[in-house]
Amino acid sequence: MPVLKVKDKVTGGTLEATIDPESVKQISGYNYNVDKYSKKPFREVKEDGILRRYFLDRDILGCRINDGKMVYHTNGDPLDNRREHLIVKQKITSLPSSSGHRWPHNSDRLLHFLEKRKGPDEDLCTEFLAKVDVKKFTQKRIDATLLPLEYESFKKKDIDLAIKRVLHKYFDWSGSLNLVKEIPPIKKDAPVPSQVTRKVVKAPEKPLPSNPYCNLSNSVEEIQQLEKQLRARSSKDILTLLGDYRIFPTEYLIKILQERGASMVQFSVGK
């Protein structure tokens, strides 16, 4: 069985590629090296100022540049280039849906697509996509964030159902949509509210009350002191305090949670 000497540029050594006798004349005059990653023999040719690579297996099967064909070695050996061990497959491109439309691949293309369509769902989805910040956009999952006011507005209009109907209608989509309500970060130098009203309850000296924040008054200095004490508590305790607006100003609780990395409140919609 004929062998072709090929150079391994990584090691500088010489390897042997097996070919069929009828392929000798076909690739004669060419010098091949071994690709660093695929380990396939290839030759380089400069055409129109562009350096192109021609692989040995494609040369043997007569494949051309950008013909959409992929050559595979059935025995997994890239140096075995006998025809009986080579198979050609056509590259698979994204197929259109039953409606004849291809998946837009990103939210901007989807917005452009829907702007040309008429219908209540299409109009609602167009308005939604123009305002939302899409974090992830695939055929299986869409993650999007938007500000609280817009979030509540779209939720009342059932945007999740509209999106699913539109994507299924045009692209046979059956993934999941996750809408995330984004809480704007509170600035560290945010001014303390001028009007803070809390009921003053005198706590007994012993035992200590389970909630020391019930004594909140209108004093700015007292608020700052209580905020300092609050930072010593766990995030779990802070979340408990969030359940009762009388205990401590919500903006300060959220501020401390954000400083610990909790900047989002998430609402998840399943399939």
Image (cartoon, helix red, strand yellow):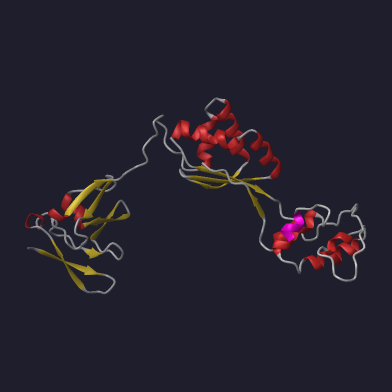
At 21% from the left and 48% from the top, the residue drawn is: 88
Residue placed furthest toward the front = 207
Q: Is residue 59 above or below residue 104?
A: below
Query: x, y percentage for residue 154?
Result: 65, 37
For the image, the number of numbered tags is 0
Q: Is residue 141 left or right of residue 209?
A: left
In the depicted view, which residue is nearer to us: 123 or 267? 267
Query: x, y percentage for residue 89?
Result: 24, 47
Quarter of the image where one finds residue 6? bottom left
Q: Is residue 257 left or right of residue 88?
A: right
At 70% from the left and 59% from the top, the residue drawn is: 258
Query: x, y percentage for residue 163?
Result: 54, 36
Residue placed furthest toward the top = 118
Start and end of the magenta stretch?
238-242
Query: x, y percentage for residue 67?
Result: 27, 44
Q: Is residue 145 above or below residue 232?
A: above
Q: Is residue 210 left or right of residue 263?
A: right
In the depicted view, which residue is nearer to us: 183 or 62? 183
Q: Is residue 75 left or right of residue 36?
A: left
- Residue 211 falls within the magenta-colored stretch: no
Q: Quadrant of the N terminus?
A: bottom left
Q: Is residue 188 above or below residue 269?
A: below
Quarter of the image where one finds residue 33? bottom left
At 71% from the left and 41% from the top, the residue drawn is: 149
Instruction: Kindly report the secondary structure that dominates the magenta region of the rendered protein.
Output: helix
